[in-house]
C-alpha cells in the first residue's frame, strides 16, 4: 500500500467527473489515504479543509490503475492523472489478478506450486481414502478389541497402575498402550483390508513399530514393499488397480506423486500430528527459512518430512543442536561441519548462508522436552548473532 498527497487546487468533483467515464474499478473517496488492492483503488482527500466524508463510486479500467500506480511511485499524483483521455475511452471490464499489488511483480501463473498444495490436490482424488470405511467399522472395532484389549491392563489402570498378586507387585507405565494416532492408523488399515477383499493390497513400510500389528497385517495378506540393496523401495510389484496403504509415519512426496500417477487406490493412515509437522515445514519454506528437524535422518517419518522441505538439516540430540548453535554464533570449519552432517542436510546446503533464518520442527516420536530445549537453544543463538 502507499499514500499520495494531493495538490491543494484539486477539486473532488473535478476528480470524480474526470474519472467516471473511463473506469472499471470502484474508487472510494475516504480519509484513509490511497492504496491499491486487487479489488479497488481507495483515494483520500481528507487533507482538504472543509471537505466532508463522502463516498463517490467510480470505475477504473486496468490501464488507468496502472497509470495511477506509475505516477504514485514516481513521487506525486495530481488530478490531471485521472483526466479524461482518448486512450482511456470506455471499454469492457478487465479483471485484475489477485496478485496485482504495488509491492509484488509476481503473477499467479508464475508462482510455483508448493508441495503442500500438490499433496492437498492428490488428497482430493476419488481414489484417495483418509477417513476410513464406515460399512466395516463395527467389525474392525470388534477385531481390535479382541486383539488389544486386556483385563489385566484394565485392572492395573483402575488400581493406580499397580497390582499385587501372590506376593508379586506389577507396575504399569501410565502411558502404556497406543496413542490416538496409532489406533487410528491400525483401524484404517484393517478397514481397508475388509473394504477391498478382492484386491491386492500393499503397504509402503511397517504400519507402526510393533511386530504384532505388522504380523497381523501380513496374516491378512497385506504385501510389504521391499527395499532394494541401495535402500530404495521396489514399487514394481504395484500394479494398476491395486491398493496401497500409507503407514502412520506417512510417505514421501515422491511416493505420493508416484501413486497419484498410477491407477491405484491409496489409503492414507498418516498420523494427523505428522501431517501437522509437514504444515510447519511448509510455513518455513514460504518464509524463506531453513528447517531444522529434531529427529533421525533415516527414520521413515523424518524421510517423509524432509521430502516436503527445501533447505534443511536434521539434528538428533542436544549435542548436535549445540554444534549448529555454535556455528550460528561463531562460524567454524565449514568442511568439517558438512562432513559431519553429510547424510542429514539438503542438497547444496551452505551453513554460512542457510542458518541465518531458521525454523524448528520435529519427528513426533522424539521427546517433547528435548525438542523444546533445542528450540530455546537455537533461539538464543539467533538472538546472540543478530
Image: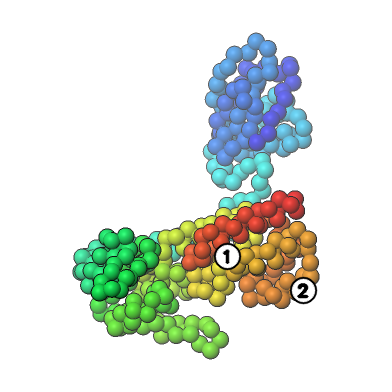
The image position of residue 136, as x and y in percent, is 22, 68
Q: Which mark is residue 294?
A: 1
- Which-is-in-front pick, marks 1 and 2? 1
Residue 93 in the figure: left or right of residue 202? right
Which residue is depicted at the point 25% across and 77% down?
197
The image position of residue 252, as x and y in percent, is 50, 71
The image position of residue 171, as x and y in percent, is 35, 68
Residue 202 falls in image quadrant: bottom left
Q: Nearer the viewer, residue 195 or 248?
A: 248
Above/below status of 43 relative to 193: above
Residue 386 in the figure: left or right of residue 124? right
Does any portion of residue 238 appear in the rendered image?
yes
Residue 344 in the figure: left or right of residue 303? right
Above/below status of 66 relative to 170: above
Residue 371 falls in image quadrant: bottom right
According to the image, label 2 marks what residue? 335
Amino acid at each position: 500500500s502507499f499514500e499520495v498527497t494531493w495538490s491543494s487546487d484539486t477539486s473532488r468533483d473535478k476528480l470524480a467527473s474526470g474519472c467516471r467515464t473511463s473506469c472499471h474499478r470502484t474508487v472510494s473517496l475516504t480519509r484513509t489515504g490511497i492504496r491499491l488492492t486487487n479489488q479497488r483503488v481507495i483515494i483520500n482527500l481528507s487533507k482538504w479543509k472543509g471537505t466532508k466524508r463522502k463516498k463517490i463510486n467510480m470505475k477504473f479500467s486496468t490501464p488507468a490503475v496502472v497509470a495511477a500506480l506509475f505516477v504514485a511511485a514516481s513521487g506525486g499524483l495530481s488530478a490531471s492523472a485521472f483526466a479524461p483521455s482518448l486512450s482511456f475511452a470506455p471499454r469492457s471490464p478487465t479483471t485484475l489478478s489477485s496478485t496485482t499489488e504495488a509491492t509484488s511483480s509476481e503473477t499467479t501463473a508464475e508462482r510455483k506450486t508448493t508441495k503442500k498444495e500438490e499433496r492437498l490436490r492428490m488428497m482430493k482424488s476419488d481414489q484417495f481414502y483418509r477417513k476410513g470405511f464406515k460399512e466395516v467399522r463395527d467389525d474392525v472395532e470388534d477385531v481390535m478389541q479382541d486383539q488389544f484389549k486386556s483385563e489385566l491392563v484394565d485392572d492395573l489402570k483402575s488400581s493406580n497402575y499397580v497390582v499385587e498378586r501372590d506376593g508379586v507387585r506389577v507396575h504399569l507405565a501410565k502411558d502404556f498402550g497406543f496413542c490416538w494416532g496409532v489406533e487410528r492408523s491400525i483401524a484404517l488399515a484393517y478397514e481397508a483390508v475388509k473394504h477391498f477383499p478382492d484386491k491386492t493390497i500393499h503397504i509402503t513400510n511397517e504400519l507402526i513399530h510393533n511386530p504384532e500389528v505388522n504380523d497381523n497385517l501380513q496374516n491378512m495378506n497385506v504385501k510389504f514393499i521391499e527395499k532394494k540393496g541401495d535402500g530404495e523401495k521396489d514399487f514394481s510389484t504395484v500394479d494398476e488397480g491395486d491398493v496401497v496403504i500409507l503407514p502412520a509415519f506417512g510417505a514421501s512426496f515422491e511416493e505420493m506423486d508416484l501413486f497419484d500417477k498410477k491407477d491405484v487406490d491409496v489409503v492414507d493412515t498418516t498420523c494427523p500430528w505428522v501431517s501437522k509437522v509437514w504444515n510447519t515445514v511448509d510455513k518455513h519454506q514460504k518464509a524463506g527459512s531453513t528447517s531444522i528437524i529434531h529427529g533421525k535422518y533415516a527414520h521413515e517419518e523424518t524421510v517423509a518430512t524432509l521430502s516436503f522441505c527445501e533447505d534443511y538439516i536434521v539434528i538428533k540430540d542436544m549435542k548436535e543442536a549445540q554444534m549448529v548453535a555454535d556455528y550460528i554464533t561463531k562460524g567454524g570449519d565449514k568442511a568439517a561441519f558438512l562432513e559431519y552432517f553429510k547424510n542429514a542436510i539438503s542438497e547444496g546446503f551452505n551453513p554460512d548462508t542457510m542458518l541465518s533464518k531458521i525454523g524448528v520442527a520435529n519427528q513426533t516420536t522424539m521427546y517433547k522436552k528435548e525438542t523444546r530445549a533445542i528450540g530455546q537453544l537455537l533461539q538464543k543463538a539467533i538472538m546472540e548473532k543478530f
